[in-house]
Image (spheres, coloured by chain):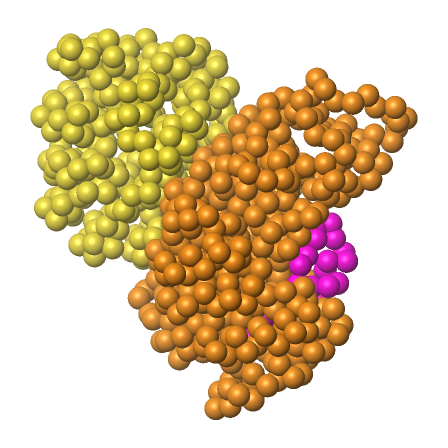
Chain colours: A orange, B yellow
């Protein structure tokens, strides 16, 4: 099976390292789902196959990029939290919203009551919308179950949705998203349940690639987070951390210490935290949609980049603090609100996002040998994707070399 | 011709005054393009027409609202300014960008070279995108021609695009958008050309409803703006003003003094300016997309609302400082960044936007007697349109009672 995207006005992100590469008038050959060749259209190798086995895609006047990767989402959930949204706009504090039964635990209650099939049915249109915005690989976290059975129900739902495709899903266990109400006076009991019951079973069944912890004042402390992450690492899971979102607790430093694959949010990261990430190679995953949704200050993207940290961008799609599947819009926010250049944004949504999912070997660029995940955008310059914002410019999506969506 | 939208989960914006009205399980009757009845589905008057003359639209589980109105755009233009966008992100000042041939005058150069047909062909997909986001009435400004012939070319293009429909366009003459290069050492000559050549011909030919002026330091002063607006008013045009965008120059006070229909931007409006608008009834049209695009502080929406000013929201769609046709996203920004409630945003995008175009008699609500401009959104609660952001929830659009788009 051969797929040929030819004569793109710009072929973006061929390089598997360094700055975002932009090749004018480029073509791309994908054989059996793997990129075989990428280069100037005039230099394309001769094709000897029977024409009937070839899918030709004319990309003249258009831009071809690697499929976008959303490396941080909570998109498996039940129940809208639109009333909480309005309460916050009217000045209510998160503490007051919690006191009225809002916040994460409200979603937990809805997810516990939902069946696996119901959760899958609710997630499918969200995945479909993400795909339409050019996102071909999506991390999805559990963390709204908070019992062994409900967390496993969620991770099984993610596995089954992954099998349905065409999207590729990366499952993350986030049992340490909150202490559930039944353990409110017994935190230790919940942490034991995480470490002794949930993590071993999830690891044994291969239900998660990553273990993540919401490390924050009044959620899980640095010491508790370290303990959970260590247990996960010992069981063979890779690590992520919700770090320094609401306060500079030292989450970035902990992520670096634990050799986590990524530290996420980082709105309040300290200079020491930045240095720690730069030294450890842990990816900083920034989620500007959440800062936008909550009207907060954005993460210090420029300082992170200038000090050598690998910066990825993700949506944080979730019902409480960032209800969107529009990842290119997150890229526009990164430009306009955090001063990232369009090239930095493309890299943050592709190669660096692949690194945040420990899938750099296969995903994140259009270099030969990588998986054939690409998108065609109906703009003549890739920067238009972020400049001309709030508009979906994606018109054709390939996953493993197959056209899985056209608009 | 009868169009019936029935059993909407919410029928929003029936009231022609007061706070945003939300009626559960509502129906709407539109006869010959005019709303005849709106109310609880159970109370719908009996229909005696032959069924074949009726378009039935089932709105169960969905929200019906008045068509959105974009009361401030510069969408008739040629040429992208994406490189300027990147220059700004890399820290270049507007003065430096201008020195490199960027800014408004770059678009002026492209528009002067374009034919009327070319300008229309470039504008059509923008209008189509706006329509798809539920915008049924759109103000369009000239202001990239800056010669009598080029300004009239642009206004004729707007008139011809309006005649094409299905959108309804409101033309504004913005000859006072910048002093063109050929008048750089003769400002007085350009103002005379505006007042003595362009305005009289435009008024005589009925090519514009409004005259607008970019009142700003280094553009048109308060005194120059007053002089141009007075001339326009004497010729029978209504007035708008780009006011207090970059500095608190007193534009809002001038707009109030001149009884302008709207004062737009207002990022730097003073307390006296707010009081003046409240007293005059001049609509404050806020353009948060521009603040977002430029990374600037937003206009003080809450202070304006609390002091009794009528607040509208618009896109400011233009290639230099806000390249988007996504008006609902502007509404999300107003919620999340300016603290407006979803109800205030709906009113700002409909009834108050109609007031900003002096078309309150016909447009902006679903009250009986108004024009049958409505949209159906595939959400069960109107607040989801802004909460679930960056996603187009509009699935059916009516203009004058006719279905003009379905997704």
Residue B288 horizontal side relative to residue B307, left or right: right
Q: Is residue A160 magenta?
A: yes
Query: Residue at point 50% right, 42% down?
Result: A345
Closer-to-camera residue (A275/B367): A275
| Residue at the right extreme, as displayed | A50
Is the C terminus of chain A in the top left, top right, bottom left or bottom right quadrant? top right
Which region shows up in magenta?
Answer: A157-176
Query: Residue at point 76% right, 72% down?
Result: A205
| Residue at the bottom extreme, as displayed | A185
Query: Residue at point 13% right, 26% down?
Result: B221
Q: How many marks?
A: 0
Q: Is residue A404 above or below residue A245?
A: above
Closer-to-camera residue (A321/A11): A11
Q: Position of residue B34 (x, y in %)?
A: 44, 40
Residue A14 horizontal side relative to residue B206, left or right: right
Residue A12 visible? The answer is yes
Is the N terminus of chain A in the top left, top right, bottom left or bottom right quadrant? top right
Q: Is residue A91 above or below residue B285?
A: below
Q: Is residue B14 magenta?
A: no
Residue A85 horizontal side relative to residue A259, left or right: left
Report which quarter residue A73 is drawn in: bottom right
Residue A114 visible? The answer is no
Report which quarter residue B213 is drawn in: top left
Query: Residue at point 53% right, 55% down?
Result: A281
Report which quarter residue A227 is drawn in: bottom right
Q: Position of residue B259 (x, y in %)?
A: 15, 35
Q: Position of residue A384 (x, y in %)?
A: 49, 32
Closer-to-camera residue (A84/B102): B102
Q: Position of residue B271 (x, y in %)?
A: 12, 49
Closer-to-camera residue (B281/B97): B97
């Amino acid at each position: 099976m051969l797929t040929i995207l030819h004569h793109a006005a710009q072929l973006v992100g061929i390089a598997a390292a360094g700055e975002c590469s932009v090749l004018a008038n480029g073509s791309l050959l994908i054989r059996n789902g793997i990129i075989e060749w990428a280069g100037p259209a005039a230099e394309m190798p001769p094709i000897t196959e029977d024409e009937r086995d070839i899918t030709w895609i004319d990309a003249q006047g258009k831009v071809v990029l690697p499929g976008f990767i959303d490396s941080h989402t909570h998109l498996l959930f039940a129940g809208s939290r639109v009333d909480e949204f309005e309460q916050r706009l009217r000045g209510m504090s998160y503490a007051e919203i919690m006191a009225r039964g809002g916040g994460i635990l409200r979603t937990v209650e809805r997810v516990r009551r939902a069946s696996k099939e119901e959760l899958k049915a609710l997630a499918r249109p969200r995945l479909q919308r993400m795909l339409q915005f050019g996102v071909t690989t999506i991390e999805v976290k559990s963390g709204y179950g908070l019992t062994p059975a409900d967390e496993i129900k969620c991770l099984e739902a993610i596995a089954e949705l992954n099998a349905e495709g065409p999207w590729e899903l990366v499952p993350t266990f986030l049992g340490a998203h909150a202490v559930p109400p039944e353990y409110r006076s017994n935190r230790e009991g919940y942490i034991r349940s995480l470490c002794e019951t949930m993590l071993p079973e999830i690891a044994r069944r291969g239900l998660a690639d990553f273990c993540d912890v919401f490390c924050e004042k009044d959620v899980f402390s640095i010491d508790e987070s370290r303990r959970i992450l260590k247990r996960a690492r010992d069981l063979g899971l890779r690590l992520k951390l919700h770090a320094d979102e609401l306060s500079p607790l030292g989450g970035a430093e902990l992520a670096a210490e634990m050799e986590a694959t990524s530290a996420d949010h980082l709105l309040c990261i300290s200079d020491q935290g930045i240095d720690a990430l730069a030294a450890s190679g842990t990816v900083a995953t920034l989620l500007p949609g959440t800062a936008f949704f909550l009207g907060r200050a954005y993460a210090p993207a420029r300082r992170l980049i200038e000090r050598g940290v690998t910066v990825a961008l993700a949506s944080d799609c979730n019902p409480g603090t960032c209800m969107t599947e529009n990842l290119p819009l997150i890229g526009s926010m990164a430009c306009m609100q955090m001063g990232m250049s369009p090239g930095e944004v493309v890299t943050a949504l592709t190669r660096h996002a692949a690194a945040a999912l420990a899938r750099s070997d296969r995903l994140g660029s259009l270099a030969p040998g990588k998986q054939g995940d690409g998108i065609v955008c109906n703009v003549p310059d890739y920067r238009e994707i972020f400049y001309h914002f709030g508009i979906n410019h994606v018109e054709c999506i390939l996953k493993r070399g197959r056209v899985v969506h056209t608009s």
